[in-house]
Amino acid sequence: MRIHVVDHPLVAHKLTTLRDQRTDSPTFRRLADELVTLLAYEATRDVRTDSVDITTPVCRTTGVRLARPRPLVVPILRAGLGMLDGMVRLLPTAEVGFLGMVRDEDTLKASTYATRMPDDLSGRQVYVLDPMLATGGTLVAAINTLIERGADDVTALCLLAAPEGVAVMERELAGQPVTVVTASIDERLNEHGYIVPGLGDAGDRMYGTAG
Ligand SMILES: O=P(O)(O)OC[C@H]1O[C@H](OP(=O)(O)OP(=O)(O)O)[C@H](O)[C@@H]1O
Ligand SMILES: O=c1cc[nH]c(=O)[nH]1
Ligand SMILES: [Mg+2]
């Protein structure tokens, strides 16, 4: 497993406003959308392409287009849904699958309540969207599901990651073809499994009270 932290002043600026507890839900959704577009630029660096011959108004030339089979984008409901539009705007040919997962707030164990994606993912590049990598339980389970279906290239886009969750991913997914792209590795998890400094509950901030 590889991890890539996107170190860019625009990312840091938007992330700071996202973290601020005064930021209301509509602004939070807009910033999450903008941030995923910036992360996607890094996350798709190795997206597969084919060469294609075209004619410009001036001459014939060879360019590239996104390869087949189409990439699959999988948001993890609920909070990951807020990252979907920004991602498919950059990857217009992508197919979209869905994983509904929730973490028990007492045991911090993740469970899956909905799965809707192709059974066979062999040869597919998969992009998983989840804003928060906290204990890592959700993302490890999600990525194992994708690998069991044959995915051989998985990239997770997370707005924030905790060092504890990164360590769990590195241990549980050692040797697997997995990359995590994040805007920040924060300081730690608190006693409730929340990322510190973090941004609170991403799903609630995205879809909770409008503030
Ligand atoms: O790394 P972990 O410790 O597993 O925690 C991270 C998960 O927790 C949050 O989801 P939550 O369970 O709150 O569901 P929601 O998106 O519906 O709010 C978040 O969106 C991640 O999916
Ligand atoms: O800090 C955290 C941890 C898990 N889930 C969230 O939404 N936020
Ligand atoms: Mg939540």
Image (spheres, helix red, strand yellow):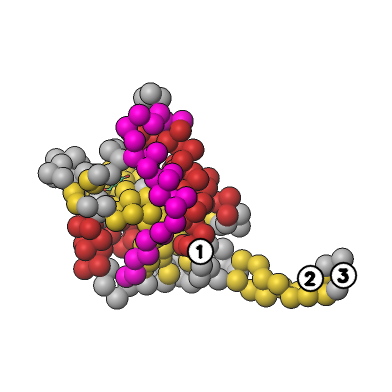
Foreground: disc 1 or disc 3: 3
Q: Nearer the viewer, residue 132 or 108?
A: 132
Amino acid residing under circle 1: Thr
Instruction: Specify the quadrant of the image occupied by residue 164.
Output: bottom left
In the picture as drawn, the residue positioned furthest to the front comes out as 9
Q: Position of residue 31 (x, y in %)?
A: 46, 41
Q: Earlier in the sequence, mark 1 or mark 3?
A: 1
Q: Nearer the viewer, residue 115 or 20?
A: 20
The span from disc 2 to disc 1 (Cα, nearest Å) is 23 Å
Question: Where is mark 3, residue-wise?
Answer: 58
Q: Which residue is mark 2?
A: 54
Callout 1: SS: loop
Q: Label 1: which residue?
A: 44
Residues at marks 2 and 3, CA–CA distance in whole angstroms: 11 Å
> What kind of residue is marked 2?
Ile
Per the rendered image, the range of residues in magenta is 1-26
Q: Amino acid at mark 3?
A: Val
